[in-house]
Image: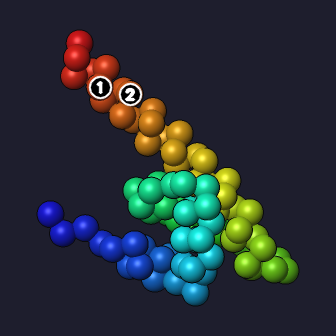
Amino acid sequence: MNRPSLEEYFITTGFYDLLPIALQLAQKLRYDQSEIIEAICKVSDKFNQYPPTKNRVAWFRLVFEEKLKESRADILAYSAKKDYLYKA
């Protein structure tokens, strides 16, 4: 299966210039690639609804960290639900 790379997700969402910041933050907080991908998609959605008015980098840091946490929760919930349904 040919999935897009992490770089391709950042290019598509328009945040390629912030990829180093995102990787540094994710590494510091110990998030994996699937959580990063989910988070950047959520950041893009938020950007389309509520774009930053002043400092794009500061906005990105704040929102990306928030979305990393949401992504981990979503992925864990999905895994638990999947495990529960297949065991039942």
Label of residue 83 in the image: 1
Q: What residue type is labelled 2?
A: Ala
Q: Residue 14, relative to residue 60: is it above or below?
A: below
Describe residue 34's horizontal placement relative to residue 40 as left or right.
Answer: left
Q: Residue furthest bottom?
A: 17
Q: Residue 26, relative to residue 83: is it above or below?
A: below
Describe residue 33's horizontal placement relative to residue 68 as left or right.
Answer: left
Visible in this render: residue 30?
yes
Contact (CB < 8 A) between labels 2 and 1?
Answer: yes
Q: Which residue lies furthest to the right in this view?
A: 54
Per the image, label 1 sits on a secondary structure element best described as: helix
Per the image, label 2 sits on a secondary structure element best described as: helix
Q: Which amino acid does label 1 sit on?
A: Asp
Q: For the image shown, how many numbered marks are present on the structure?
A: 2
Badge 1 density bin: few <14, some 14–19, many ≥20, Cα 10 Å: few
Badge 2 density bin: few <14, some 14–19, many ≥20, Cα 10 Å: few
Give me the residue at 45% from left, 33% from top: 77
Label of residue 50 in the image: none
- Which residue is denoted by mark 2 in the rendering? 80
Considering the image in quadrants, where does the N terminus appear?
bottom left
Q: Distance between the residues labelled 2 and 1?
A: 5 Å
Considering the image in quadrants, where does the C terminus appear?
top left
Q: Which colour scheme is used?
A: rainbow
Residue 65 occupies quadrant: bottom right
Q: Residue furthest top?
A: 88
Give me the residue at 40% from left, 56% from top: 34
